[in-house]
Amino acid sequence: MKKIKFLVYAFILALIVSCKNEVSEINKGSVIESNSPNIVVIYLDDLGYGDVSAYGATEIKTPNIDALAQSGIKFTNGYATSATCTPSRYALLTGVYPWRNKNAKILEGSAPLLIDTAQNTLPKMLKTKGYHTGIVGKWHLGVGNGNVDWNSQISPGPNEVGFDYSYIMAATQDRVPTVYINNGYVDNLDPKDPIQISYKENFEGEPTGTSNPELLKMIGDPQHSNSIVNGVPRIGYMKGGDKAKWVDEDMADHFLSKAQDYLREHSKDKSPFFLYYAMQQPHVPRTPNSRFVGTSGMGPRGDVIVEADWCIGEFMKTLKEEGLLENTIVVFSSDNGPVIDDGYIDSAQEKLGAHKPWGNLRGGKYSLFEAGTRVPFIVSWEGQIEPGVSDALVSQVDLLASFSALTNTEIAKNDGQNLIDTFLGKTNTGRENLIIEATTRTALRQGDWIMIPPYKGPAVNRIKNIETGNAKEYQLYNLKEDIGQTKNLATQYPEILKEMITSFESIRGESYSDTEEPVFR
């Protein structure tokens, strides 16, 4: 009898040890759940790899972004998934490649919600571990079900995909509706002045940039010459909601204030928080506050980058003042690469001077070349991350899986990888490969190489003056030796090309050819 009891106890003990080891292996690199840190993602809009002095810019200074890099890990191979904003934001929040969703393209301001409300998201995942979740800033992932009534509750939206608090603009600064939305309701809306929105035709009697140029303080191209708000012509048509309309020059301060309020409110809570601070700079229209006009010497585009850097400094100052800095992971990145001329006449090209927003990369926004998706990518955690520079291949699509491991949360398998040790600087090992995307076209980054399949269409988008990456033949570049992608090695290394095509098709599928004309907006 004693022998049997001994064997039973031994079996139970072995089982407990086995379970502990299994859990430890699953959550390798994670922290204790009760000490889960706050998580902040600061996300800029159209900021290029070369727009930050920490990444080599010499003509513009970004001291507050640089401070993040100096206190954390600066990734030199950090990627958005896409060379345009909506797809990249989709990937960041869902951990899923955007090309898996045929609707993950640049959306109109009245487009329906892109993320399925049943889909797992980064804020949803964190909520299961007691996090309060908030978003402040640009959304651009659709709202409603396709027929939005802007004068009542706007749903579904951020609140229905995991955010406890949302204070957003629906799409972009150059699109209607030009109002802020507070937890599903237009902020400061006068019920007696209801909002109407259309992306098809104007409302009778409403001025536009084309018909009423005398009302403009900024001139737009034909696409950006619809309804006029605050002297700026927009994409789309809007009527009503005058008291709710934003003042563009105050937008940076407004979003900063909301983000700071969020920090102050939740510094008093014992539970952790996740804040997605999605800034609008340097996307068009570039409308710096008067305090920043002329500060860069490069015109409005440079000025709004200086403004954004100041906002980040004020935000980090608030983190410190509220006693949150040492228990908060801060991720800094951009949704895609840079574009200079993107719809408004603002002297951005003429005043660029020696500044290269793309750095030593080729291409830019909308492009399959490196400058389209390789972006500034910094992870900082005061006192927890030893500062350094990492060449590991990482992507924003990995944040969900990585923070899942950090908080000991189980999630269904997705396209993201658990790189929490990489993000925390414990290892320099990153992804083996990554699919990047630009206006429905995809390519493969693997090791030191990138392979771009043949695509139809022009090699240069003449409107934006950016190389698209399109070519009749396969393109193969060794980025370690040729970061500027000047030498196509596809014919010189047929075995590497074949291997990469096989890898690409195993992930992407064989039906990856472009089936429609790219959209540049």
Image (spheres, helix red, strand yellow):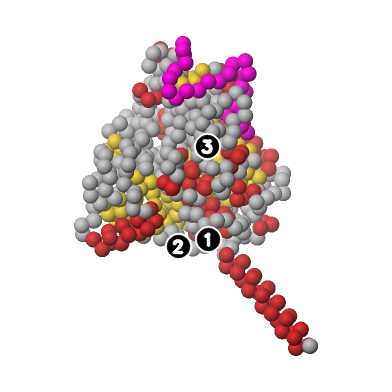
Residue displayed at 52% across by 42% down: 115
Which of 266 and 476 lies nearest the eye of the viewer?
Answer: 476
Pointer 1 residue: 421
Tell me whether the residue at label 2 lies in contact with that at label 1, contact meaning CB atoms closer than 8 angstroms. Answer: yes
Instruction: Estimate how packed mark 2 is, as few (under 14), some (14 to 19) or many (20 or more) residues with alpha carbons within 10 Å.
Output: some
Vertical comparison of 300 with 131: above or below: above
Residue at 38 percent across and 23 percent down: it is 220
Q: Measure how far apart labels 2 and 1 are at the Cα level.
A: 9 Å
**Whole-percent x and y of residue 423?**
51, 56
Quick one: label 1, few (<14), some, or many (20+) residues within 10 Å?
some
Foreground: disc 3 or disc 2: 3
Disc nearer the start of the sequence (3/2) = 3
Image location (x, y in percent) of residue 258: 61, 34
N-term mark: 2 or 1: 1
First to last magenta residue range? 180-206
Name the residue beneath numbered marker 2: 429
185 with respect to 512 (left or right): right
At label 3, the amino acid type is Leu
Amino acid at dot 1: Asp
User: Which residue is painted at 62% across and 15% down in the image?
Assistant: 192
